[in-house]
Each structure stands twice: as structure tokens, then as C-alpha cells.
Image: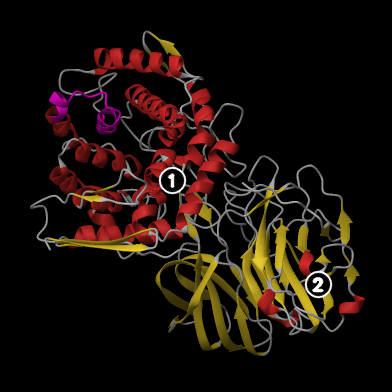
Amino acid sequence: MKAIQTNAKFIWTKDCISPNQHVIFYRRFLIDKIPEKVEAIISVDTKYWLYINEKQVVFEGGLFRESLPGAGYADIVDITKFLHIGHNMIAIECWYYGNEGRNNVDSGTPYLYFEAEKIGINSDSGFKYKYHPAFYQTEGDEEPSYLYGGYNIGFDANLDKKDIYNPADYHNLESSIVYPPNKEQILYERPIPLIKKFPYTSCKPLKKNNYYEVKFLHAAQALIHFVLVAKKNTVLNIKTDRYETYGGPGDEHSLYKNHRIEYICKEGINEFTSNFYLFGEKFIIETDQDIEIMEIGYFDTGYDCDIIGKFHCSCDITNRLVEKAARTLYVCMRDNFMDCPDRERGQWIGDVAVQAPQVFFLLSQSAQKLLKKCIYDFINLRKGDKLVGCVPGVHSSELPAQSLIAIGEYGIISTYYKYTNDLDVLKLSFEPSVKYLMLWEMQSGLLKHRNGDWSWFDHLYNVDQDVLENAWYYSSLKFVKKVADLLDDHRYDSFINERIEQIGSNFNKRFWKGSYYASKDVVDDRANAVAVLAGLCEKENYEKIKGILLKVFNATVFMENFVLEALCQMGYIEEAYRRMVSRYYNLAVNENSTLWEDFFILGTKNHAWSGAPATIAFKYFLGIDTDDGFKTYTFKPVEGLFDNMSCEFYMGDNKVTINYPD
């Protein structure tokens, strides 16, 4: 990460600690000559929208904190083409949350930082401000889920001003207050692209009395746009079909609220485009008064990458699963990877392990920056020697199983390195990974169980945590051993080799029951699959393990990824295909454009950990592999599985098209 040398001041308003503030900062200035390139450095807590000469330059700037403990990010934006000779006006609309969630951390002091040295404009008391008059705090309903930050949007069109981004009363506005940058206001350069705003999609609303539905082309992080005629003070309640979401397995009776927009109409024609996205597959507008909609639609928004990977075969269920996996992956990306955009928005590190391979097959190259950022979050925001999940965010916690997956052979670090050969992530993660593994004690040649903050291996029933914990840990040992060789860093060889030898010598003695692995009476498909993936299962026992994986179905959608991977690793790819289409069938054929959280239709209708079919299709059905960071690839399709297969993906800027049989 690159630190920013701060030359400007940190500014805000007089009442600097109120939550849910919508403030616009202004600076009017003269330019005699426009430099060849003018870049602005901008940082806020929490989000901003930049306008120059009343034209939007940045849609949704600001990246959720933190990069390092207590530190934030700064955007670097080329503003050259928006400047002109003579008078110019900069307007920066800021939204300070003042609350926290599983993806954001409150600085405690809202601020704006702006620096454009080439034109001599730096944030200081020369910046003026006003509170946006149209925004208000909604009342009488629940706020959005505590699991993610922000508030509902209240917007009164009667108080909106046409000159809001170039106010006529500029000289009468209050001057900003300069605050000394406290020790927490350390800024690092934003490592990922700014949020992308896609072209406008016009829609035809479905009207049911005073209830309107606007259906999207697919699940989206959407901005509503409308032009309508209404009486003064008519109230529109705008939300999506994902406004209410239930918890996942084990939490299915808990109800979580999403954001909504409350819009108070002015008399006559109302034209509104939200800057704040709502997630779902359709907008819902409720009102108790008659309105006449003249135009309505939405702008899709999201991480600045494209879905470019394609897979097609003679099985329609597989095709639909891969297509839905791509959309699920994309809507679970923004400032960070999310488990789901409609309940938590947390970067659970186990979910990202499932997402990681899909990034390289399904998305354009810029998506890889978000995966690298995820790794840096995971390592830099650890708590002592504990590697925690769901960072950045204030609800982070250590789930040892997820952290072991993350640093092991099937985790985010190994996957990122496999497809990039980027040694930076290995250098960053090697020592923290080893020190994390040192937190476990041994007992009779195997691990002494560690609870962490949450001893979670998968939802629901029959989880054999003893087998899983030892197998995931062994896989992590094997990967850090590989990293030690790649980095030529052998400081921890004694510890690593001793632990590998201990678990390798005792795992089968303790857990092998003649035809399956178990620590007690329960036979768990997940535990047997991970024993295979860790390399602890002898090849002569593969046929017996296959039998278990074809008749035991404890795994939720999350762990199903690893069960399918194990079947494929053992060479039973056709069996993996049959298990996959059977278990995912309901998720494939339902009306949603994304994949549900659970096989039993619990929880969210889109969830990050559900995309295993895409990985299986590219990696095993087509047999695409690389050993040089995707500079080249090998291709070994499964014969006889389908009548035909084809795919497209990119290696860097090079498009690869495969048709089988050709």
C-alpha cells in the first residue's frame, strides 16, 4: 500500500459529531491556465460525490475504512477535463454515516480532505459548506440492519435547490472548520477502481392501485430514476424486493431490514435520480396518493469490472448455474467482497475462498485488485496473532476454520498466487500465517481444539469438527511450507515440518474407520472431503470416500464447494457433476438471477459462497489449469460428460475461446 503525504487540511462543519449528515463543501476559484494534468486527492468519512462546474466527476467516492488499524483511504482523481479558464466551482457532497457495520469502521470524527496542488486548491477554511436542505432523518420505522452502516434516505423535493452544486448564496455560506489530523487520519492510496455507474435502463412499471413495481434485468445495486407528476407532499416509500431478508440456516427466524428511500414530492413534476443504491431485482414504490409516472428506470452500479467469462454445455442446468454464479459474484462486490448485499455485506473470509477462483474465470482483470485488497485486509487487520474474518468492520471475529481455509491450499492467498504469481501477497502473509498456526497446541500428535471467537465449520448438523480442524490445519501447514520454499525463508521449517509429521502420522490412526473418516459416530461428507483435499486420505481409499460423498448430504452450500472439489480431485468428475446438478437444482431453476444462500431456500437469495458450479465447470469439466500465473494454460476436458462444451475467459488482455469438441 502507498501512503499519502498530506499537505491540505482536514475540514468539516461546526457540529462535527452528528451522525447521518449530508453536507456539501464548496470552493470557487479562478484559473488562468489549465495544467496538462490535474489530479485531486480526496478522502472522507464516509462517502462523497464530486461535482466540478455542476458536472458529476465522481459517483460515490470514498472507500470504507480501514487499510491499517485506524487508517483510511484516499482517492486520486484526474479532474483536468472538467476545469475551464476563468471561474470554476468545486462541490463535494459528503455523507457521513456515523455508524458502523461488518464492512465499515467509524473514524469518530467526520472529515473531508481535498488536495489539488497543480491548481493550488487544498481543503482549508477557505472551503464553504451547507447542509443539503432536502435530506432528512426518516422516522417511524426500523433503521437498516446493524450489520452494515448507513441510514435510510429521506428526501424532500420541496426543499431541493436547482443551484445546489453552484449556489447563488456562495459568499454567505459558513466557512469550514479546520481540524488537526489526529493520529487516526493516516491515508493510503485507494487500491481498487472507483465505483462504476452503468448506462441508464428505462423500464415499464407494473401498477397495482398505488403500488408500483419496476423489474430489473437482473439483481443489481441500483439507483432509481423517475420523472412523475404528483400533488405536494405526496410521500413515496421506495424499496426493493430485498428490503426484508431472513437469516441463514440456524437464524432463519430473524428478519433483517435493508435501506429504503422516503421521497416527499413537490407540486407538479418531480425528477429524481438517487445517488444511493438499493439492492434487489425490482424497485417497489408505495404511496397513498395518485401519481402519474412519466419515466422510470434505474442505473446499475457496482465494482468497476465486467462479467466476461462464459461457459456453455449441453446441460441447461449447468449453464444456468454458471450464469447465476457470475451474477452472484458480481453483486457481492463493491468496497470489499460481501457475503450478501442485502443482509450483512461482510467480507467473510471463507466466502471469499469460494469466490476467489471465479474471479479469474468470470471477471475482467481489474477484479483481481479487490481480491488482493481482501488479502491485505485479512493480514493487516489481524488482532495480535489472530487472523480474523469479516474485516474491515467492527463485527470482526475469529472463526478458526475460515482463517485456516484462507491461508491453506484452497484459500484466498494460494488461489491469488496461483493465477498471478504475485509474490507480494506471499511476503505479506507468510509470517502472520505461521504465527497464527502457532496458536494451536498439540495433544497426542493431533490438534488441541481452539474455539476462537466462534467455533464454526459449517451450518446445521453432523459437523465433525475434529476431523475438519486437523485437516484444514494440515492443509495450511502444507501451503506455508510451499511459501517458505518460494520465498527461500526457512526460519520456521522446524515448526512446520514437525507439525506436518505429527498430524500426518496420527490422523489416519485416529480418524480412519475402515471405510470413512470420523471422530465419533457421525459420518460427515464435509470431513471426508477435506481429508481428501488435505492429502491425508490414501488413494486406495478413494473409492470408499466416493461412496460416502454420494450418499451423505450434510454440507450446506458453503461446504458443498469443497465436497465437489474433493470428488473432482479424486478423479470422479462425472459423480461430482451428478451431485452438483442434484443439489443445486432448485437454485438453478428458480426465478432469481442469483444463487440462494442455502439448498433449502433459507436466508438471502444471493450469497457469495454459492458459486462453486462456476469453478467446477472451468477447472474440472473443461480442465483449465495453469502453473505460471495464467500466462499460459492447459486444457484437459472430461470426455463423454457432455455432447459439447465451450467457454470464454481472459488471461490479462488476451481473450481465450475454447470449443470442445472442436
Could you tell me residue 108's position as x and y percent? 76, 47
Of residues 402 and 409, the one nearer the viewer is 409
The answer to whether 58 appears left or right of 636 in the picture is right
Res. 505 image quadrant = top left
Outermost residue on the top side: it is 444
Could you tell me residue 485's position as x and y percent? 41, 27
Secondary element under disc 1, as helix, strand or loop, is helix
Which numbered marker is on residue 26?
Answer: 2
Q: Amino acid at mark 1?
A: Val
CA neighbours of label 1 inside 10 A, class few (<14), some (14 to 19), many (20+): many
614 over 509 or under it: above or below: below
177 over 619 or under it: above or below: below
Of residues 443 and 636, the one nearer the viewer is 636
Of residues 162 and 261, the one nearer the viewer is 162
Quarter of the image that includes the C terminus: bottom left
Mark pair 1, 2: CA separation: 40 Å
Secondary element under disc 2, as helix, strand or loop, is strand
Res. 26 image quadrant = bottom right
Of residues 312 and 430, the one nearer the viewer is 430
Which residue occupies 20% across, 59% down?
317
Is residue 338 visible in the rendered image? The answer is: no
The answer to whether 620 appears left or right of 120 in the picture is left
The answer to whether 617 appears left or right of 439 in the picture is left
Which numbered marker is on residue 352?
Answer: 1
Colour mode of the rendering = secondary structure
* Residue numbers of the magenta segment: 524-542
By secondary structure, the bulk of the magenta-drawn segment is best described as helix
Q: Please count the marks in the image.
A: 2
